[in-house]
Amino acid sequence: MSMTLTSEMASQAAQAYLPAFNCPPGTKMHLLDLGTLECDEGWYVEHLDLSSHRYAHPYGYGRLLRAGNTSTVTNKSPENKRRELIVLSVLIEHPQEGLILFETGCAENIDINWGAPLTDIFPRTVYNKEHRLPEAIKATGNDIKDVKAVLFGHLHLDHAGGLEHFVGTDVPIYVHEEEFKHACWAVATGADLGVYLSHYMSLDKLNWQTFNEPHLDLFQGITLHHSPGHTPGLCVMQVNLEKDGTFIFTTDQFHIAENYEMSHPHGWLARDHTAWFNSLQMIKRLQRMFKAELVLWP
């Protein structure tokens, strides 16, 4: 049996109006604040903006410098601008699958698990009891023990350190195959030093589940899109809600608004510029097609 795809049906699919494209009715989504890090903005911005335009970003207004904070002949001692960046996680109450967590933030004790010089380069400036992952989940009326799946955009230390709460459990940990392989290689060889740490990359005490599809519909209404560039296996998460529309959580594909709005690649945290730019274009197409709300975080 064949069926002609009408323009109206195609439009509905693109807008995530068809039931199979949306999360089930009753789905709830919570944005978790897991504290704040501070760092030199050169980590996040590469391009020099010589215009007089000013762009808004989540933490204020400012002009960004290509090769941010780099000295020049005319300014050999520039001001080293710094930014505070909120560490976030997403908790989804999914009627079919239960509690789903997207990323886990930093380890609770970064002085021990990170140590110097990382805590000097990326100091945590805001972190109280309510910013601990179990407490942040508890504030939504849920319990971390009830999480049924953990999804990852990537496995850097400020996104995956909270895996320490899932060691020894059977909770599936979903991550792109390229990200998992790169993280294991980085930890084992010391390459890409500092951004992946062994304390949360347990191979035998975590239930790792990898995938290699470029676009994975993991649960109803929840899709992971492979977006390499910052890391080889980075994925952004798309969530289609019945009433509130589509959200795309971009993890470290975009650290700040200028990365997206002005197509400015990352600064010192860049890995593959070509892949990053191709991912940027893919995400812009998704945003336009679904009229999605983009959520950026470091």
Image (tube, helix red, strand yellow):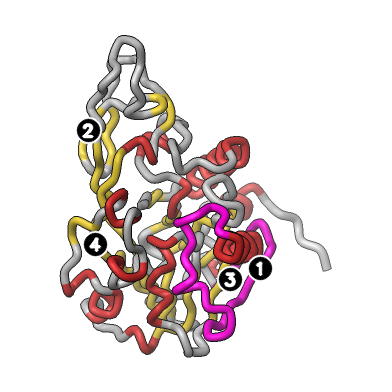
Q: In front here: 214 or 97?
A: 214
Going by the image, does 175 lie left or right of 73? right
Check disc 1 and report the residue beneath it: 211
Mark 1 vs 2, N-terminal side: 2
Q: Position of residue 101 (x, y in %)?
A: 42, 73
Tags 1 and 2 in contact by the CB under 8 Å rule?
A: no
Mark 4 vs 2, N-terminal side: 4
Check disc 3 and report the residue beneath it: 218
The residue type indicated by label 4 comes to: Gly
Check disc 4 and report the residue beneath it: 35
Task: Tell me the distance, in whole angstroms, between the alpha carbons under discs 1 and 2.
Answer: 39 Å
Task: Tell me the distance, in whole angstroms, between the alpha carbons under discs 4 and 1.
Answer: 30 Å
Q: Position of residue 68 (x, y in %)?
A: 36, 29
User: 10 Å neighbourhood of mark 3: few (<14), some, or many (≥20)?
Assistant: few
The residue type indicated by label 3 comes to: Leu
User: 10 Å neighbourhood of mark 2: few (<14), some, or many (≥20)?
Assistant: few
Residue segment shown in magenta: 190-219
Q: Nearer the viewer, mark 3 or mark 2?
A: 2
> Is residue 214 shown in magenta?
yes
Q: Nearer the viewer, mark 4 or mark 2?
A: 4
Tags 1 and 3 in contact by the CB under 8 Å rule?
A: yes
Q: Secondary structure at mark 4?
A: strand
Mark 1 vs 3, N-terminal side: 1
Tags 4 and 1 in contact by the CB under 8 Å rule?
A: no
